[in-house]
Amino acid sequence: MVRPAPDWFSDNIGIGGTYQQLTSPPVGNHWWSISLFNNDDQGSVYRVYGISAFQEGGGGFLAQYFKGAAGTQVASCANLRADYAPPSGQIFLEGPNTIAGQFNPFDVNPDVGLVPCAGFDSAATMPGAPLFIIPVGYSLKLVNPSSSLQVAAFFYYQRAAN
């Protein structure tokens, strides 16, 4: 049995994410983006090994790279090991934006992947190899392609030398 890379470097594993819900939704479509921003001051890239995602609209999340931070910071990341200091890494949120239009206004960059999750179910994608690599100063941004009152995304990443 071959152990995946994060198992060898578990002292450099960061985790972070957010869950958001509209409790009194206005009429219209509900658009969001959740992103992991690399703010590492040592020049480390983030190798994203897993994403756990949920949106009740279904269809998964479109994944995009974004230069800079997108939206408002809603969380800092934690170390996988509880007694270690928090790593770099910040979670940002755009939305909710409620408009009558058919398209997510936060869907502005080319898509580089699709993070699966069915409507009203969550899904965890952890293939054992990096899904995405985020350089310093960039974000991995997830945008919902279908309207949703609730969204969540949690990232599992390794800080690694460039």
Image (spheres, rainbow, N blue to C red):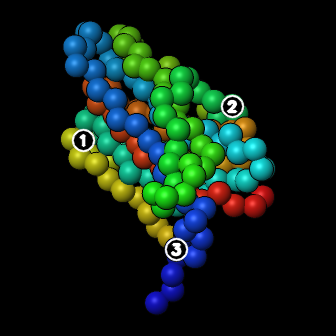
Q: CA distance from mark 2 to mark 3?
A: 29 Å
Q: Earlier in the sequence, mark 2 or mark 1?
A: 2
> Residue 146 in the image: x percent, y percent?
35, 30
Q: Residue furthest front?
A: 83
Query: Closer to us: mark 2 or mark 1?
Result: 2
Going by the numbered disc 1, the residue's amino acid type is: Gly
Q: CA distance from mark 3 to mark 1?
A: 31 Å
> Residue 140 in the image: x percent, y percent?
58, 42
Q: CA distance from mark 2 to mark 1?
A: 30 Å
Element class at badge 1 = loop
**Label 3 belongs to which residue?**
7
Can residue 98 be seen here? The reply is yes
Report if the CB atoms under discs 2 and 3 are less than 8 Å apart: no
Q: Nearer the viewer, residue 72 or 78?
A: 78
Can residue 113 be seen here? The reply is no
**Label 2 belongs to which residue?**
68
Element class at badge 2 = loop
Residue drawn at the location 42% of the way across and 26% of the way down: 32
Q: Quadrant of residue 30?
A: top left
Residue drawn at the location 49% of the way across and 58% of the way down: 83
> Residue 156 in the image: x percent, y percent?
49, 55
The numbered mark at residue 119 is 1
Residue drawn at the location 28% of the way across and 21% of the way down: 22
Q: Earlier in the sequence, mark 2 or mark 3?
A: 3
Side of 43 relative to 55 (left or right): right
